[in-house]
Image (cartoon, helix red, strand yellow):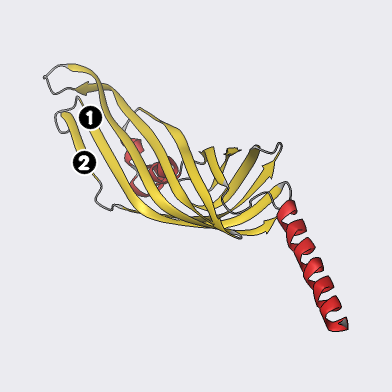
C-alpha cells in the first residue's frame, strides 16, 4: 500500500511538473509562426563594390560611380513539430544597382555625349528550414536554424557605349542556397514578437516582426 501511495504521489508530481513546463514555454507543439524581416548589410552589393574598387580597379575608368540597392527582405514560416524543434520555409530577396558614367565619350550612335555602363543584380531564394529552439521561456525564444534550398540570380548590363551597347541579361548558374544562424525572439504580447538573427545568409544581421497563431 505504501508503495502504491508513493507511486501515485510521484506520478502526480511528475504530471504537475510537465504541465508547469508546458505553461512556461511560448512555443508549445503545434505553434505556427510567421516573420517578416530586413537585413544589413547588403552582402551582394558590398562584395561587388569591393571587387570593383579594390581588386579590379574598374571604377577608376569612370568619372562618376554610385552604388544603390534594396537590402535583403526575408519572410519565414515555421511549424513547431515537437518539443524544441520546428520546420518551415524561408524566402529571401535582394538587389543592387551600379551606375558608372563618363562625362564625355563617343557613344554607340557615333555622337559625343555622356556615356554609361550600368549593372543591375537581383536574387531570390526559397529554402526548407530546420530550427532548434535551445532556450524557451514565457517570453523569449533563443534558437539555431539551418536552411537549404533553391535560388535564382540575374545580372543585367546595359550601356550606350560602343563596346557595351545594349542590354545583356545573364543568369548566374549556381542554384543552391544555404543559410544558418542564431536568433532571438522576444514576445511583447501573446501573439506578437520582435526578432533578430545573426549568421550566414543574404545579410549577416536581420531583424523584424513575428506573428504567432
State the residue at coordinates (52%, 50%): 79
Q: Nearer the viewer, residue 35 or 109?
A: 35
Residue labelled with disc 1? 158
The answer, for residue 201, to whether it is visible in the render is no
Please state which of residues 171 and 85 is positioned toward the viewer in this rendering. Answer: 85
Q: How many marks are shown on the rendered structure?
A: 2
Marks 2,1: beta carbons within 8 A: no
Q: Is residue 79 above or below residue 49?
A: below
Query: Please, what secondary structure does the residue beneath circle 2 have?
Result: strand
Q: CA distance from mark 2 to mark 1?
A: 11 Å
Determine whether, in the image, residue 2 is placed left or right of residue 170: right
**Most distant residue in the left direction:** 110
Residue 172 picture location, percent across and down: 25, 47
Helix, strand or loop at mark 1: strand
**Residue beneath disc 2:** 170
Mark 2 vs mark 1, foreground winner is: 2
Q: Within 10 Å of the Cα at label 1, are there few (<14), some (14-19), or many (20+) other Cα atoms?
A: some
Q: From this view, report whether residue 21 is shown above or below residue 101.
A: below
Q: Is residue 141 left or right of residue 12?
A: left
Q: Which image quadrant is residue 94 in?
A: top left
Amino acid at each position: 500500500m505504501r508503495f502504491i501511495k508513493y507511486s501515485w504521489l510521484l506520478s502526480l508530481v511528475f504530471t504537475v511538473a510537465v504541465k508547469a513546463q508546458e505553461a512556461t514555454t511560448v512555443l508549445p507543439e503545434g505553434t505556427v509562426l510567421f516573420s517578416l524581416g530586413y537585413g544589413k548589410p547588403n552582402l551582394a552589393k558590398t562584395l561587388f563594390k569591393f571587387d570593383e574598387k579594390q581588386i579590379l580597379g574598374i571604377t577608376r575608368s569612370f568619372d562618376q560611380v554610385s552604388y544603390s540597392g534594396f537590402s535583403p527582405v526575408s519572410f519565414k514560416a515555421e511549424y513547431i513539430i515537437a518539443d524544441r524543434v520546428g520546420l518551415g520555409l524561408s524566402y529571401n530577396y535582394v538587389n543592387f544597382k551600379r551606375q558608372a558614367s563618363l562625362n564625355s565619350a563617343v557613344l554607340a550612335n557615333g555622337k559625343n555625349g555622356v556615356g554609361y555602363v550600368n549593372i543591375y543584380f537581383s536574387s531570390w531564394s526559397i529554402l526548407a528550414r530546420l530550427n532548434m529552439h535551445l532556450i524557451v521561456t514565457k517570453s523569449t525564444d533563443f534558437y539555431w536554424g539551418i536552411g537549404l534550398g533553391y535560388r535564382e540570380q540575374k545580372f543585367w548590363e546595359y550601356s550606350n557605349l560602343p563596346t557595351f551597347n545594349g542590354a545583356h541579361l545573364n543568369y548566374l548558374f549556381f542554384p543552391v542556397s544555404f543559410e544558418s544562424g542564431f536568433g532571438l525572439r522576444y514576445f511583447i504580447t501573446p501573439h506578437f514578437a520582435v526578432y533578430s538573427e545573426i549568421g550566414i545568409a543574404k545579410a549577416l544581421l536581420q531583424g523584424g516582426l513575428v506573428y504567432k497563431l
